[in-house]
Image (cartoon, rainbow, N blue to C red):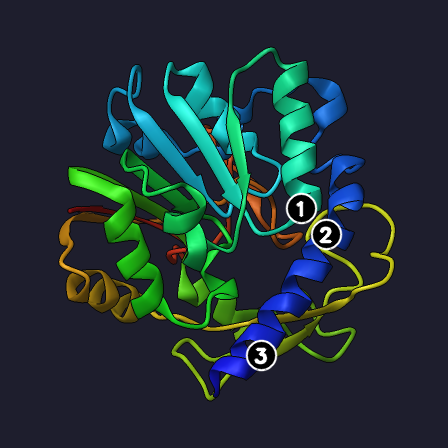
Amino acid sequence: MTTDEHARFMRANRANWDARTPVHLASRFYGLDQDLDPARWFASFEWDDLGELAGRDVLHLQCHLGTETIAFARRGARAVGLDFSGASVAAARDIAAKAGLDVDYVESDVHDAVQALDGRQFDVVYTGKGALCYLPDLDRWAAVVAQLLRPGGRLYLVEFHPLLNSLGPKPAEGEGSELLLRHDYLAGDGAVHRDATHTYTDGPAVEGATNSYEWMHGISEVVNALIGAGMVIRGLRESDELPWPRWPQMVRTPSGWWRLPEPRIPLLYGLLATR
């Protein structure tokens, strides 16, 4: 796939996320009208791995509405959120202002983050939960992350497990709720086109730009991209829980998150790397 094709697909994705933003702002999924604690989007192990954030410079890449960015600010971090969607950044600024929090939001493609942030470096770069699938080139992404970190700084990536993205319900109706391996686990040839008329939230259809393009990335691709950028992998966790019920048969856990009743399979992973 050519650079021009990548750029075209990224422009389509930006337009789609601009169009998603008003739907997500009004959704019960984000519950912004309920003043819910943004920490609900974090697994307990994330805070253990992230450690003390007070007084730290924390950058949240591909932050969308900035809900997790706000959680960092509430823990005393000097938090910055970055996203390529102008509509999302505007919404995130408004949400933070209403919460009375000092959070800096920057509109930029993640690949241009070093320039957009004027070379600023951070103690922690956080990203994930549906972010990497919108990036075509993880080697390029990892190189950017390495430049954004101070020496000794930490990347914390919490992402949906490739196995989760490979699962899907039986295609025919009337066959129960069994999940099957229906999609590639490993990277295929080029981008996968999605009809994003409806997003992962409740609410009305997206108006206007409904084309979306995603790329599959196996865990080995992520790990090797970071190693290639000079990063050191410090830990890798796999979890069978998600912060929302992806499928109807998922059950609530004591943590308040959701898992499949059986078998236990990884749905989320957390990766810690240092520069």
Q: Amino acid at mark 2?
A: Asp
Cβ–Cβ below 8 Å for labels 2 and 1? Answer: yes
Chain-order first, disc 2 or disc 3: 2
Q: Is residue 237 left or right of residue 249?
A: left
Where's residue 147, x and y in %? 25, 50
The image shows residue 65, relative to residue 19, as above or below, that is above
Query: In the structure shown, which secondary structural element does the residue marked by tag 1 occupy?
Result: helix
Q: Residue at x 71, y 44 (%)?
A: 87
Residue 169 vs residue 122, the one in the foreground:
122
Q: Secondary structure at mark 2?
A: helix
Residue at image coords 64%, 50%: 85
Residues under labels 2 and 3: Cα distance?
20 Å
Q: Mark on residue 86?
A: 1
Q: Indicate the position of residue 144 as horizontal and vertical percent values.
A: 32, 56
Location of mark 3 (residue): 192
Query: Disc 2 designates what residue?
Result: 18
Label 2 to label 1: alpha-carbon separation:
7 Å
Type of amino acid under label 3: Val
2 or 1: tag closer to the N-terminus: 2
Instruction: Say few, some or many: other residues with alpha carbon within 10 Å of mark 3 (under 14 / 14 to 19 / 20 or more).
Output: few
